[in-house]
Image (cartoon, grey):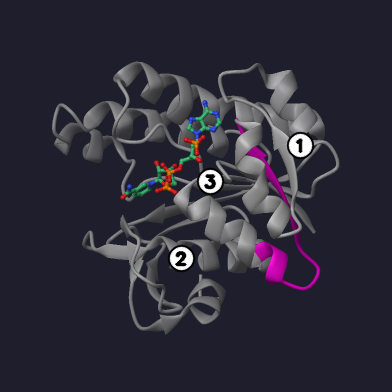
Amino acid sequence: MKVLVVGANGQIGKHLVTFIQDTDGMEARAMIRNPEQASFFENASAETTVVDLEDDVDAIAKAAEGVDAVVFTAGSGPHTGKDKTILIDLDGAVKTIEAAKQAGVKRFVMVSSFDTRRAAIQAASSSFSPYVVAKHYADEWLRDTDLDYTIVHPGSLRNDEGTGQVTVSQDMDLDIAEVPREDIARVIVAVLEQESTIGKEFQVVKGTQPVEEAVRSL
Ligand code: NAP
């Protein structure tokens, strides 16, 4: 299975490309926006493709040509303005979904945020709510497609070493808690391996159940 990782140079993205490369039968194509970022991926023997999420759908679709799955784990981050929240977290995600459709790639894994329901928008602080709005509508856009999607809703991301153990819930009823980015990357690999996750979405925080078992339980 060849997987296009959108946001490959990000903190989850780098773990994910490494894990994919270490998994039998899987290989990654890292989508980066700057050629200078390529060396990390070349060292991992992963393909790279240079596309900016502010480019058009055709450019992203070209990057997705010939892959079996797309993972969206890009984000504008906390240090840019609301313009980038719209351009990357919302429109970048929607363009990636449209690109997958255009390239004929059915499998799509979205790294969303912990809670993107309408109530979470209303409950968010004024500085955080534009991000929740962006994630809400990106998730909605994906649900409205006929792609084989899975939406992962991680808790509060940390750079602690992963434990390989998590807690998951499809009922979206977990209390917000931390989760290592490394474990989210492991969860994404398990999701890609398990077709039973198609059409599902779930929250994930640090926990006590081995990742593969937790994902299989969904
Ligand atoms: P990250 O380290 O900030 O990585 C985001 C990646 O997106 C970076 O590689 C960045 O590229 C890329 N990107 C940004 N703008 C781009 C553009 N115009 N074109 C192409 N790529 C672009 O993020 P993370 O911590 O791994 O998080 C990944 C995902 O989890 C995001 O979707 C985030 O919203 C979501 N999330 C975060 C939290 C949290 O607690 N922070 C919780 C739940 C979900 P560069 O490397 O070139 O900058």
Counting every numbered tag in the picture gives 3
Q: Label 2 belongs to which residue?
A: 182
The residue sitting at 66% across, 68% down in the picture is: 194
Task: Indicate which label's residue lies in the foreground, 1 or 3.
Answer: 1
Image vertical order of residue 55 relative to residue 44, above or below: above
Contact (CB < 8 A) between labels 3 and 2? no
The residue sitting at 41% across, 73% down in the picture is: 162
Q: Label 1 belongs to which residue?
A: 64
Q: SS of the residue at dot 1?
A: helix
| Res. 195 visible in picture | no
Q: What's the amino acid at mark 1? A: Ala
Q: Quadrant of residue 72?
A: top right
Boundaries of the magenta span? 20-33
Residue 33 horizontal/vertical position (percent): 60, 30
Q: What's the amino acid at mark 2? A: Glu
Q: Label 3 belongs to which residue?
A: 110
Residue 44 tag number: none
Mark 1 CB near ligand 1 (8 Å cut): no
Q: SS of the residue at dot 2?
A: helix
Label 1 Cα neighbours within 10 Å, binned few <14 / some 14-19 / many ≥20: many
